[in-house]
Amino acid sequence: MDNIVIVRVDEIGLKSKNKILFMKQLKFNIESKFKDLFSCKIVGNRIYLLPKYSFNNRDLENLKKIFGISSFSVAKKIDKDFEKMKEEAYKLVAESLNDDVNSTKSFRISVNRADKSFPMKSPEIAGEIGEFVLSKLPQLTVDLTHPDINLEIDIRPEGVYLFKDRIKGAAGLPVGVSSTGTILLSGGIDSPVASLLMLRRGMVINAVNFYSPPFTGPKSLDKIIKIGAIISEYTPFPFHLYVVPLTKIQMLFKNLEENQFSVVLQRRSMMRIAQKVSDITDTKVLITGESLGQVASQTVENILTISESTQKVIFRPLIGFTKNETIKISKNFGLYETSILPYEDSCSIFVPKNPATKTQLNKIKKIETALPQISELEEEALQESKKFEIKNGNIEEIDVFKILKGGVL
Ligand code: ATP
Ligand code: MG
């Protein structure tokens, strides 16, 4: 089989010492999705995917969900023989005309001579091959700046690769190279995006979702599982989703006289429970989808009051994003349609009429001290959680919290 896929790696230039570790993780991640179709080989800064049987472009859709890939190309590999290069270049350009023999498209031949022992220089190779293509397809024109068809010829020690397109990858770092975290995952727009942004920085994540049975119905549960399934497609590791019933705690805060603080109190409870999940499953940080000033609970004062409830470091990848930017990313990741399904989120049900935008920590602590049952209720909520393991979109309910391991190396 002479068609192969060339995978180029993102940010690899930045990683001198850890380079091989990153490459191995990326290779593992690709293999875990494509083991039936390709065998993978690391060569320098690239990974070659060698097909086990013939494939079409649809088979490659999932490559776009593997973080760490800057771009990839389907290439023809041939021997380092100039006559063969000419023939193959002509064939590939002709192929892009889609049988339209009268097409007046423009083209360019771009040559990269990575193997300096090849006897001709790049401009000479490009010139001669360009002329050969023109002699066979005289209706075409050459355009070096904005060609319709850019045929790249890459001459390497092991052979010559010819390809037309560089398909954009998901970029970032391979999942598994940046430790572990627990995301507080709502069914909204922001925290699913935050999950994918952390995966894109190489972090392995699990998730805690809070729901309010019976006020939030089975459809909200379906929705969060659906979101989990989409997230799981972007990681080679099983994605664990823990769904924790918060109703009793919410009722407690709702019935307080000063219920303008209930959102912050509820968030502090969420943080403490998420911290417990993080401790049990051995993850290193907590993650939220908060964005500064977006809603009442996201003022600096409230973020500080909420943060104080845990000793864990909290990552907030969306803190400086506008809502429209987040929506755009949500659409790109294929999350948006699910995120906007109209089922109630556990928090929105218990939002008071006038939530406090500036809470004072001592006031909040005083309320909490007067409610010693909180910690018991939090423990109970944890015990009553539902647990799911989602692999590549396949959902399975499990019985225990699972320790989250980082990368393979
Ligand atoms: P999102 O779009 O992520 O729901 P939001 O704009 O609605 O965010 P908030 O409702 O204030 O903002 O939530 C802030 C963050 O708190 C969320 O991004 C998420 O990390 C966490 N969070 C909120 N509700 C829940 C929930 N029901 N379960 C788990 N985490 C939640
Ligand atoms: Mg929300």
Image (spheres, helix red, strand yellow):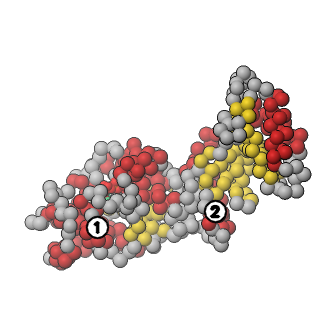
- Find disc 1 in the rendering and name its residue: 300
Q: Nearer the viewer, residue 93 or 282?
A: 93
Q: Amino acid at mark 2?
A: Ile
Dividing the picture into quadrants, the one containing residue 277 is bottom left
Q: Amino acid at mark 1?
A: Val
Residue 113: percent from left, percent from top: 80, 52
- Find disc 2 in the rendering and name its residue: 12
Neighbor class of circle 2 (other Cα within 10 Å; few <14, some 14-19, many 20+) is many
Q: Is residue 264 above or below residue 139?
A: below
Give the left or right position of residue 258, taking residue 175 as reference.
Answer: left
Residue 116: percent from left, percent from top: 84, 57
Q: Nearer the viewer, residue 118 or 56?
A: 118
Residue 327: percent from left, percent from top: 39, 48
**Which residue is farthest left?**
257
Give the left or right position of residue 351, taking residue 166 as reference.
Answer: left
Residue 93 can be seen in this image: yes
Which SS class for mark 2? helix
